[in-house]
Image (spheres, helix red, strand yellow):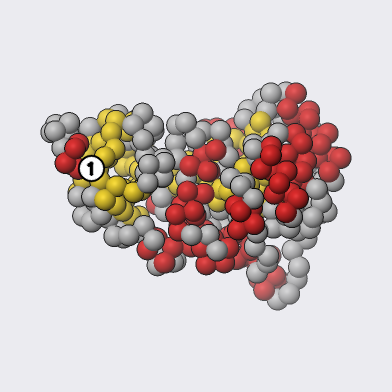
Amino acid sequence: MIFIRNTSEVLTITRGIIRRGAVLIEGENIIAVGSERALAKRARRAREMDARGCVVLPGFVDSHTHPVFAASRVEEFEKRIRGVRYDGSGIQDSARKVRAATEAELLVGLKERIAQFHRHGTTTIEAKSGYGLTRESELKMLRVIRRAGLIPTFLVHAKDGCELVTEIAEFCDVFCDRIAFSVPESRRILVAAKRAGMKLKIHAEQTSHTGGARLAAELGAVSADHLECATEADAMALKKAGVVATLLPGVAFHLGGKYAPARMLMDAGVTVALATDFNPGTCPCPNMQLVIAIACSQMRMTPVEAIRAATINGARALCREGRIGSLEAGKQADVIVLDVADYRELPYYFGVNHCRTVIRRGKVVA
């Protein structure tokens, strides 16, 4: 049993802020959240964790990543700095290197990246395939994702990709864009995936407006991701269908591009999640703290809105809001202790890793 005490704030997400709150953990689960005084009697036999005036909140939920790859794309990064526009060709480069790598080599690299996620406070990670582009290589990627304990999504990334893979993945995602699949092509893929029992996601309205967001609403997708070019009509469709809008501000930061209209989506009543889109080409950053800071400064989300988007709303984008994403009795003990006295200092002091302690399933992982 672990008793996290002596906090400045416990940000529960669903129950607001508890000043000088405490969290009691037993095994893999949270058994109580409340004031330190109220929990002290129950915690007599627990191991104390002194939070020393820190902020305690749920572990971040990163609901959109591409962390299985064999090499960086620093050459592409430098070319882009020199003015070469991103056209999606880097996917082919990643695919060649993934196909050449062994499953063991990919797993070693992925585990190193997972440790980076943990150090920055992310305790749940969705991971996409998509760099295989053949059935064999996509399955290899998905096996690696499963072996690493991440949430697997089969991503149909490029038109010379492979047939639908349904054996391992929980979600199916399609890159619906002018440089990838059209709306009719995306619909055919997603309908087939839905018939096979998979939950749906879609890369939508990223580099141009194509109708991907409304396709997500039409098919009842769990989330529509990117949405940099989304319109008010898209927002109304997403709201009506209950589709989570997963925004990826790290991409615009890295590419120097357009940010998604977060305020417009939220004002329309759409549930907005934040994720890193960690990948070797357009956002090689596993740090959800930085994503939250960018969302506040560039997309005008308030600190509490951004943190909520990075926790419980990210859990909704993975159909896991009943288990993770907030600090509540009975939920999984994914807890982070931040070395700040006020939760608003998380995005205010940007570019800093504030994590003092990261707990996943009741065990300290960083």
**In the rendered image of this protein, does residue 90 appear above or below residue 37?**
below
Place of residue 324 in the rendered image (x, y in percent of width and height, measured from the top left): 44, 36
Confirm whether residue 65 shows in the render. Answer: no
> Residue 174 is drawn in which quadrant?
top right
Place of residue 276 in the rendered image (x, y in percent of width and height, measured from the top left): 56, 53
Confirm whether residue 188 shows in the render. Answer: yes
The foreground one among 255 and 16 is 16
Number of numbered discs overlaid on the protein picture: 1
Residue 253 left/right relative to 218: left
The foreground one among 69 and 289 is 289
> Residue 79 is drawn in which quadrant?
bottom right
Q: Residues within 10 Å of mark 1 (few under 14, many from 20)?
A: some
- Image quadrant occupied by the N terminus: top left
Place of residue 114 in the rendered image (x, y in percent of width and height, measured from the top left): 47, 46
Name the residue at 68% across, 28% down: 198
Name the residue at 29% across, 38% down: 33
* Secondary structure of the residue carrying numbered label 1: strand
Place of residue 191 in the rendered image (x, y in percent of width and height, measured from the top left): 78, 30
Name the residue at 69% across, 39% down: 240
Question: Farthest residue in the bottom direction?
Answer: 82
Looking at the rendered structure, the kind of residue marked 1 is Ser
Name the residue at 70% across, 49% down: 235
Residue 232 left/right relative to 20: right
Q: Which residue is mark 1?
A: 35
